[in-house]
Amino acid sequence: MYVNSRLTDRFPGLIIPQPAPPPASPPKKNFIHSIQTACDVLLLMNPQKNVVVAANKVSSKVAAVSFSEDSSYFVTVGNRHVKFWYLDASKASKVNATVPLLGRSGLLGDLRNNFFSDVACGRGRKADSTFCITTSGLLCEFNQRRLLDKWVELRVSPSALSHCLSVGEDYIFCGCADGTVRLFNPNNLHFIATMPRPHPLGTDIAAVTEPSHLFSNKPDAKYPDTIAVTYDLTNRWLSCVYNDHSLYVWDVKDVRKVGKVYSALYHGSCVWNVEVYPEVEDSNRACLPPGSFITCSSDNTIRLWNTDSSSIHGTSLHRNIISNDLLKIIYVDSNTQPLLDTESNCAEKSDSQMPETKTGIRTLCVSPDGQHMASGDRAGTLRVHDLHLLGELLQVEAHDSEILCLEYSKPETGMKLLASASRDRLIHVLDVEKDYRLLQTLDEHSSSITAVKFTGRNGVRLITCGADKSIYFRTAHQSAEGTQFTRTHHVVRKTTLYDMDVDSSRKYAAIGCQDRSIRIFNISNGKQKKLYKGSQSEDGTLIKVQIDPSGLYIATSCSDKNLSIFDFYSGECVATMFGHSEIVTGMKFSNDCKHLISVSGDSCVFIWRLSSELTINMRQRLAEMRQKEKRQLKTPPHKHSIPIRYLRPPEYL
């Protein structure tokens, strides 16, 4: 699918699916612009040769840029800034060195004190004109002599900002605050119409199953700001991006009857964690369709996703008309401010003006039976939701600092426990069957706890690691006070331990370390069995590790924003992936072994398609494991089954 660069430039970190090809061809001279705001330098580059053609300094930060239809000039705008830039193409082609850009300021007149947030050069009969929009709500037109010819008011509320515009031959689209998009005639700047607004903030999208639900305006509703628009001349579609990271594509063939072609919702801020919904043996007890996964974010939401459009499931969740992939948004409170990406606004606030707030869901975990979902936020609050009714069962201030990890015990342990670990260095163990009653608090760690895992068969072990470079192995036993965990092994390394996962055999724990190594430990005796490199990079730190369901491969994410997949036993790198613009904060293999799902600080969720060879190997191993379990079940207790040799791990383990 085509990714519109104009939208992604204004909306960093968002992958935008466009149902239509680009509406306009690239500039005829094959120049692209690159703005280096750090040192206030404007660069014009030739993409074919990857060289700087021309450059010049700018006096203020550039908010937007637009090329003229014939590519003879381009225009930049910003605070009290509208400038026309010209390049002598004949001179540039003869000289190998970078030539200076010729800049001429626009004649702003009475509007010289405005912040110009966006610019678009005219098309067709208005190709000689340049249109700009100000944050104060003015649409301006400059003629071919750079003179401010005329302007009109957008008539938005005084407190609302105007952010963006897009120009076609018949319409000018102006994107403003509160989801407003105004249409004007480019020939005379006469007002034509107002576009429909998107969904209100805090909408329960699972309930929006009919078009009438989307367009039913509520008097007290708040809407996200329109921060980027682009017009497809071929299909006459208008694509709008809003500052809650939602995308709408509107059909504007008839501006009196605008229709929605496509829409999608994404997280508005850093995505901290992802969990794949488990495979439930009794499909009638499954709360989500097969292939579903759940994410949590700093935008204070938990989102339930399913990308299989053919999936039909007899639950209360149905396909909605806002998103093809998003099933449900769980809002942990009524505050809608965290949903908005404030960094996307043109008139950015300084760091001192941005209050530090501890909002956002930091981690989550789904119970093995798929009935409950536990989540922890940055303030230390633990919540448990019933996934069948999607209601909150529990909310408790469990920790003094943000909860970094949660873990439900597996069915083979014979117990139903939940462990929560925090930056306050405490671990709470809760009894799920007794309404999450506190069983024990562990305080051996001297710093933040980065990972906690349950393991064991017919018994429970608890393994934790943290920023204090320690690994604690604990075993559960029964006492007069109930189930208690006691330390059996304590291992210290010379590097910080950032994440941990347990393999499918429940015998080995893999830990991702600050020195980019993966350390494999034997859970029964706490001894390190193997060490190998967990990143192809020579710099950075391992952030996350994840073992696939079969136990054959381990995926890692590094602070260089790349992902890698290694053979768990040999340490050989079998795949590398890159595409996130920020650190990958979580990842999971899908249950069908076809995909790896990753989430990142760039607010994106990526679904990577694994090679068929990896999928076949994992599925074959899972089939062998199931066959072994069936043989063990059929074998009488007093007889010992012959071990299956191909399931035995290599000698070093």
Image (cartoon, rainbow, N blue to C red):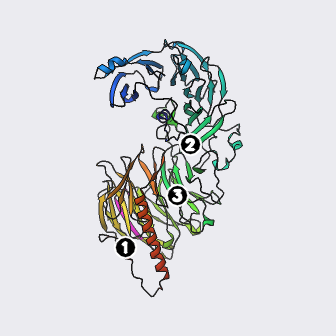
Q: Examine the rendered structure and indicate whether residue 437 appears above or below residue 630.
A: above
Numbered disc 3: secondary structure: loop
Given residues 467 and 228, the one toward you in this image is 228
Q: Which residue is mark 2?
A: 339
Q: Main secondary structure of the magenta part?
A: strand
Tell me, yes or no, whether the two marked residues, 1 and 2, touch with CB atoms within 8 Å.
Answer: no
Q: Which mark is residue 646?
A: 1
CA gap between label 3 and label 1 equals 45 Å
* Amino acid at the residue labelled 1: Tyr
Q: Examine the rendered structure and indicate whether residue 128 appears above or below residue 285.
A: above
- Frontmost of labels 1 and 2 is 1
Q: Examine the rendered structure and indicate whether residue 128 appears above or below residue 565.
A: above
Crowding at dot 3, Cα within 10 Å, few <14 / some 14-19 / many 20+, comes out as many
Q: Residue at x 49, y 54 (%)?
A: 274
Q: Earlier in the sequence, mark 1 or mark 2?
A: 2
Crowding at dot 2, Cα within 10 Å, few <14 / some 14-19 / many 20+, comes out as many
Question: Which residues lie in the magenta part?
Answer: 466-474
| Quarter containing the C terminus | bottom left
Q: Which mark is residue 398?
A: 3
* Amino acid at the residue labelled 2: Leu
The image quadrant that residue 649 belongs to is bottom left
